[in-house]
Image: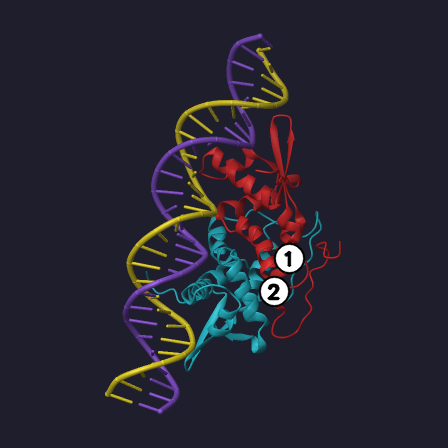
Chain colours: A red, B cyan, C purple, D yellow
Amino acid sequence: MPPAPAAPAARAAACCAPLTAEPLSPESAEAVVPLLKALADPVRLRLVSLVAAHEGGEACVCDLQEAFDLAQPTISHHLKVLHTAGVLTREKRGTWAYYRVQPDALGAVAGLLSAPAGTAAGTLAPATGCGA
Amino acid sequence: MPPAPAAPAARAAACCAPLTAEPLSPESAEAVVPLLKALADPVRLRLVSLVAAHEGGEACVCDLQEAFDLAQPTISHHLKVLHTAGVLTREKRGTWAYYRVQPDALGAVAGLLSAPAGTAAGTLAPATGCGA
DNA sequence: CACGGCCATCGACATGCGTCAATATCGGCG
DNA sequence: CGCCGATATTGACGCATGTCGATGGCCGTG
């Protein structure tokens, strides 16, 4: 398998058009779905939350593992999925591996789902890297 | 299976705490995940988008089916999943069935994923029904 | 240099999920 | 009353995915 180290999906994902504005193209849908799939698991969702809320915004695997009743390879697998989807970044320092949340990823999905109530437009999520 | 006609998940889902603020409880995670799972499919994501962007905010199955290369039962199945998750509402008028987007559902997920960049708080999504 | 702990990978298994063909249901129309 | 078109339901099939046990690589330590 070619190196897909991180986050192709997060970037191509939801940039600006909330899906309530106009029909999502098949390509855009395929681009966003990996991100949603990565988040659509209770363990992974909690993992992201734990990392994000952890002191310093980063957490090592041993810390995360304690919150679950799962085997270590399972946690490692979920972290890999989140990393591949571009939700988490990995950094190995010494013996431990530290994970962080890539803020753009969540912001992109949030922006896509931000729905103007009724017919009004607006509600642009600020500063999720829409312009870059 | 008992009748779960619509939207238990959407309500219990993400109300106020973005998961970057504090760790998500296992129960909350289990509550939100059905919604994310419902959206984590390219066909369903496009269905939601098509319904939302359709004239009048509603669309019948025959309209939606034309946008895909899938059999009719498949579309019906996806619509049922979205309806069960509380993303779409169904109304049968005469021969046709019309679907609408339940705005609270998307707003809840968007609010959950809205991440304050870095350490700053803020970036509250307005008017997604958090208080109601 | 040998050992031990942290983490990732591999292989296997069970379950879940997307898809379809066939069929049922329901409402309108001749 | 009988037909037809629009949706929903059922049953089956194949692929994707979550989980585990076993194993391997890497780094720090004795």
Query: Crowding at label 1, few (<14), some or many (≥20) Cα neighbours within 10 Å?
Result: many
Q: Residue at x 47, y 39 (%)?
A: A68
Q: Quick one: label 2 or label 1, which is nearer the N terminus? A: 1
In the rendered view, tell whether residue D6 sits above or below residue B33: below
User: Do discs 2 and 1 share a chain?
Assistant: yes
SS class, disc 1: loop
Q: Is residue A3 left or right of residue D7?
A: right
Tell me where residue B15 appears, x and y as whole percent: 55, 59
Q: How many marks?
A: 2
The residue closer to the viewer here, A5 or A75, is A5
Q: Which residue is mark 1?
A: A14
In the rendered view, tell whether residue D9 sits above or below residue A129: below
Q: Residue at x 38, y 64 (%)?
A: B4
Q: Amino acid at mark 2?
A: Leu
Tell me where residue D6 appears, x and y as whole percent: 43, 76
**To which chain does the residue with label 1 belong?**
A
Tell me where residue B31 appears, x and y as whole percent: 47, 55
SS class, disc 2: loop
Residue D25, image quadrant: top right
Give the number of the disc on residue A19: 2
The residue closer to the viewer here, B91 or B108, is B91
Q: Is residue A24 visible from the viewing direction of this image?
A: yes
Query: Crowding at label 2, few (<14), some or many (≥20) Cα neighbours within 10 Å?
Result: many
Q: Residue at x 59, y 48 (%)?
A: B22
Tell me where residue B33 appears, x and y as whole percent: 49, 54
Asked if marks 2 and 1 touch (Cβ < 8 Å), the reply is yes
**To which chain does the residue with label 2 belong?**
A
The residue at the far right in this view is A132
Q: Amino acid at mark 1?
A: Ala
| Real-space Cα separation, disc 2 to disc 1, in angstroms | 9 Å
If the image is split into quadrants, where does the C terminus of chain B sit? bottom right
Residue A31, image quadrant: bottom right
